Image (spheres, rainbow, N blue to C red):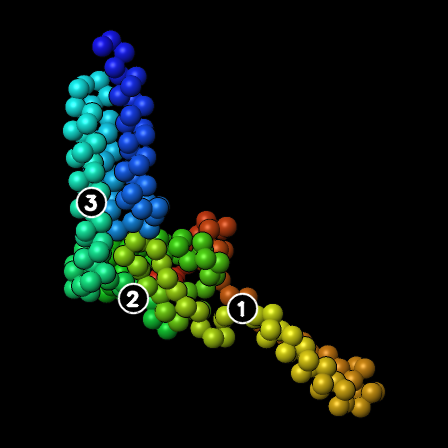
Amino acid sequence: MEFDWIWNSILVVVGGTLLLRLAGRKSISQMTLAQVVIMIGIGSLLIEPVSGDSIWTTLAVGLILVLTLIVMEYAQIKSDKFERFITGQSKIIIEDGVLNEKNLRKLRFTVDQLEMKLRQHNVAVISDVRWATLEANGQVGYELKEEAQPVTKKEFQQLQADVQQLINLLEPAFAKGFSIHMLSEKEEDIFTEVAEETANNNGPDHLQ
């Protein structure tokens, strides 16, 4: 029929939506390599039969691809070795505030790329990071050193109570003029590098 392409287009959208819904809800940044391959394959398949007669065959192939992905994901749950083979492992890229150059080179991950990821997590200084890993989905996981971790509301309230108790123990005349001055030297951070359009010396030249 002359207007079959309209029906095929609608069917592609509906069928493709159902296939992707079955495949999972992860965004591209959270997908494993196998998931990305399947999604690219489905996208390529769905557009081909719009002007042809193989719409049902295409949807069937897409369903087989999704079912294969589901089987692989269940296999990863059952076997750690299979999961490591398909998904890969996290790699340490910062250890105790020091860049792991060996893993950065192996992962082809530059210091600038790492700083971009850290800035997105409001981390200003690499030396404040106790551990940082590059995950299998390309995201950076990190843990700050204890002294660099933000104070929680509970900790702040406890500090207030301790300070108030200390003040109450002091002589009134001394307590009246009591003050604490915190002096800290300004440290160049990875946000300053972007604002001033300059490069810092956080890492070796060959990884900048």
Q: Mark 2 or mark 1, which is nearer the start of the sequence?
A: 2
The residue carrying mark 2 is: 92
Measured as percent of width and height from the top left, residue 42 is found at 23, 36
Q: Amino acid at mark 1?
A: Pro
Quarter of the image where one finds residue 206: bottom left
| Residue depicted at 30% across the width and 17% down the height | 6
Q: Amino acid at mark 2?
A: Ile
Q: Mark 3 or mark 2, which is nearer the start of the sequence?
A: 3
The residue carrying mark 1 is: 150
CB under 8 Å between discs 1 and 3: no
Determine whether, in the image, residue 104 is placed left or right of residue 175.
left
How many marks on residues?
A: 3
- Mark 2–mark 3 Cα distance, whole angstroms, equals 33 Å
| Residue depicted at 45% across the width and 54% down the height | 120
Outermost residue on the top side: it is 2
The residue carrying mark 3 is: 67
Quarter of the image where one finds residue 106: bottom left
Q: Amino acid at mark 3?
A: Leu
Secondary-structure class at tag 3: helix
